[in-house]
Amino acid sequence: MPNLILPENEAVFSLFKEIKTLIENAQKRVAMAVNAELSLLNWHIGRQIYHYVLKEERAEYGKQIIQQLAESLTKEYGRGFTRTNLLYFVQFAEVFPDISIVHTLCGQFTWSHIRIFIYIKDDLQRQFYIEMCRIEKWSVRGLQDRINSMLYERTALSRKPDDLIKQELSLLKEQDFLSPDLVFKDPYFLDFLGLKDVYSEKDLEDAILNELQSFIMELGGDFSFMARQKRMTIGNKDYYLDLLFFHRRLKRLVAIELKIGEFQAEHKGQMELYLRWLEKYMQMDGEETPIGLILCASKSEEHIELLRLDESQIRVSEYFTELPPKALLVSKLHQVIENAKKRFK
């Protein structure tokens, strides 16, 4: 790449920067338009194959046709039309049969994003990842990482009946309305802190502050760090909140308390006190009521149910400083989801 020769005159340099911005923005729009057209082309190709070959229940014949078609198209147009890619196109048309939805997807995401979406089997999970990816602008790698970390299964949303999940996802899609049940997770993965064996709450807090960027990434988009050990003077006594954040889309303060042991009933009262203080002294005009997150090493679901924390502005989540085996984690999360859905019946 040749060295950029910049104008020496200040006025010319200012004009140069403005024109440079115009050119680069135009290039981005062109790239996005090309990407959308190519993704739409992939859908049309997949639709043609699906309707005229595979849908006719001629599976073996269909396999032969796709292979021959791939060879011919590859010779003519290059590697973008391999057998594997043609199968992606067919899956795209099968999962998203509505052309209006396809137009929207192609305008919002790259083909690499779409290729990930089409292999999410559950419709509600797929819609969750599509809308969260849109609103938080995840990269392809970011999207895949969140799917691998079972983000959907870790949200409170996943534990609701399907009709309520649909309602929240509809609000997110149509109004960009992000509820706390979409933001907060259970459990949180804090394996990046490097904590082993025995550690104190101060050790946990120090490790989080040392790895603040990673911690915020695990919390989710739109969290901003405000303070550690936030002092709250009530009467003649001082209290200290472990961590204070602000969530831009929720438009509310988020108080976080760290517990190295099991959740206890008295933790609720402590958090309620902190939230009322924040509401009285720190909440600004236009903000929603502060919300609290208690991060603990373990918890009893019966405690949470009897204390009716799901109806309050307090969330209780476990955290893992060392990740359990994937199979064990999947089994545990699915069991939690199933038990939670039963309580709604």
Image: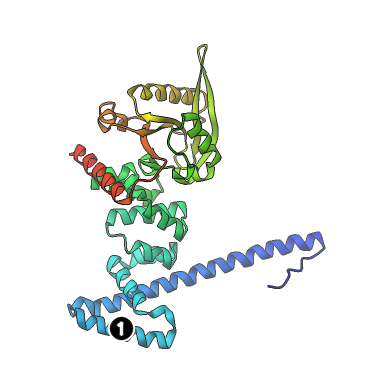
Disc 1 on helix, strand or loop? helix
Q: Which percent across, then down, holds residue 341?
A: 22, 42
- The residue drawn where x is 42% and y is 55% is 145
**Which is nearer the eye, 6 or 29?**
6
Q: Which percent across, then down, holds residue 122?
A: 27, 56
**Which is nearer the eye, 223 or 320?**
320
* Quarter residue 10 falls in: bottom right
Q: How many marks?
A: 1
- Is residue 212 positioned above or below 314 on the image? below
Q: Is residue 316 left or right of residue 163?
A: right
Name the residue furthest front. Answer: 197
Q: What's the amino acid at mark 1?
A: Gln
Q: Which residue is the site of mark 1?
A: 67
Colour convention of the picture? rainbow
Name the residue furthest top. Answer: 236
Q: Which percent across, then down, holds residue 320?
A: 39, 41
- Is residue 23 positioned above or below 262 on the image? below
Q: Is residue 160 visible?
A: no
- Is residue 86 positioned above or below 9 on the image? below
Name the residue furthest right. Answer: 9
Q: Which percent across, then down, holds residue 45?
A: 34, 77
Q: Is residue 280 left or right of residue 63?
A: right
- The residue drawn where x is 21% and y is 76% is 55
Q: Is residue 65 visible?
A: yes
**Which is nearer the eye, 34 or 88?**
88
